[in-house]
Image (tube, helix red, strand yellow):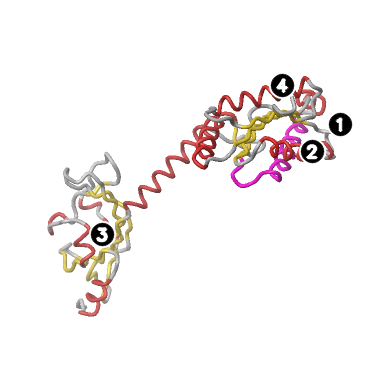
Amino acid sequence: MNLSKDVLFFADQLSNGVMIFSPECEILYTNPIAKNMWDHESHSVMEGFATGFGEKTISQYEHPVMQAIQSNRSVSQTLLRQRGAEKSIPQWVKMTASPIQDAGQLKYVVLSLEDVTQSKHVSDILTSRSYMLDQLDVVDSITGLYNSSYVPVLLERTVSDVIEKKTSLSVCVFDIDHFTRLNEAQGRRCGDDVLRYLTALLGQHMREGDVMARTGGGEFLVLLPSCEAKEALERMETFGTQLRSAALPCSVRPITVSGGIAEMAEDEKGVQLVERADSLLYLAKLDGRDKFLTEDVV
């Protein structure tokens, strides 16, 4: 079996690098893409690769071409090309070595080369962020909402967005009335059912960009970008009315909430905004509960 001109012409047009080796690892052909991927001499094609940053360079026997020859099967591996010191950007190369046989005898090994440096970096970033979120344990196991440990991040991000867009931001802090008494009288399972129902109902009143978090036993935080305090009050009062009229099997009395709503002032920090809303929540409880208060109605 000989390498035909048609095969070589086809390989020259491919967008990935292609190299063809003899069973003795001699390079028989290199297409233009492979030549441009790195400056290499024939003796260095099997050298200079590692499995990752700080990892020891692999031996020639661990190279996909050698593994394909030894196992007589296709071998694929993504390796880090250890460039010279003058080149600071590393190069990740996905290599797939495939043995080609003729009459049961190995004739060639075709090596496909794909520069996956950019996608590898994106994948590493996403993996790192996912790991960080897992480590922070930012999701409440009962409601599926963010918990208090992630609120500072949510607050900073939301405030930054509304400042950049030059729009308004309202914050609502609310608490389930007598939630501790409910848990004691009806049991923790009933309390969990109330939390899940409340979360689902509240979600029906959220728009794209709104953020919900459970910050305590029966306490919640809602961030409402592009929403002034008056509109926020109307939305939360509608939610409260629907919650009050809900018939939950485990609860012998209506579920009500008390809350405070504050609209961000110019140059105000997110923490100060939440503190103002929290103060209004406290006033709502002193004023008999089952209501939302804004500074305009206090």
Circle 1 — which element? loop
Q: Quadrant of residue 295?
A: top right
| Alpha carbon distance from label 4 to label 2 | 20 Å
Circle 3 — which element? helix
How far from the left and from the top, in percent, is residue 231? 70, 39
Q: Earlier in the sequence, mark 3 or mark 1?
A: 3
Report the predominant secondary structure element of the magenta stretch.
helix
Say what amino acid the circle numbered 3 marks.
Gln
| Alpha carbon distance from label 3 to label 2 | 69 Å
Q: Is residue 252 above or below residue 127?
A: above
| Alpha carbon distance from label 3 to label 1 | 75 Å
So how many labels did they put on this image? 4
| Alpha carbon distance from label 3 to label 4 | 74 Å
Q: Which mark is residue 253?
A: 1
Q: Earlier in the sequence, mark 3 or mark 2?
A: 3
Q: Earlier in the sequence, mark 4 or mark 2?
A: 2
| Alpha carbon distance from label 4 to label 1 | 22 Å
Q: Which residue bears the numbered disc 2?
A: 243
Q: Which residue bears the numbered disc 4?
A: 282
Task: Give the residues drawn in magenta, as a range.
Answer: 188-210
Q: Which mark is residue 77?
A: none
Q: Which mark is residue 70?
A: 3
Q: Earlier in the sequence, mark 4 or mark 1?
A: 1
How far from the left and from the top, in percent, is residue 130? 47, 41
- One can see residue 218 in this view: no
Label 2 Cα neighbours within 10 Å, binned few <14 / some 14-19 / many ≥20: many
Lateral position of residue 277 relative to residue 253, left or right: left
Circle 4 — which element? helix
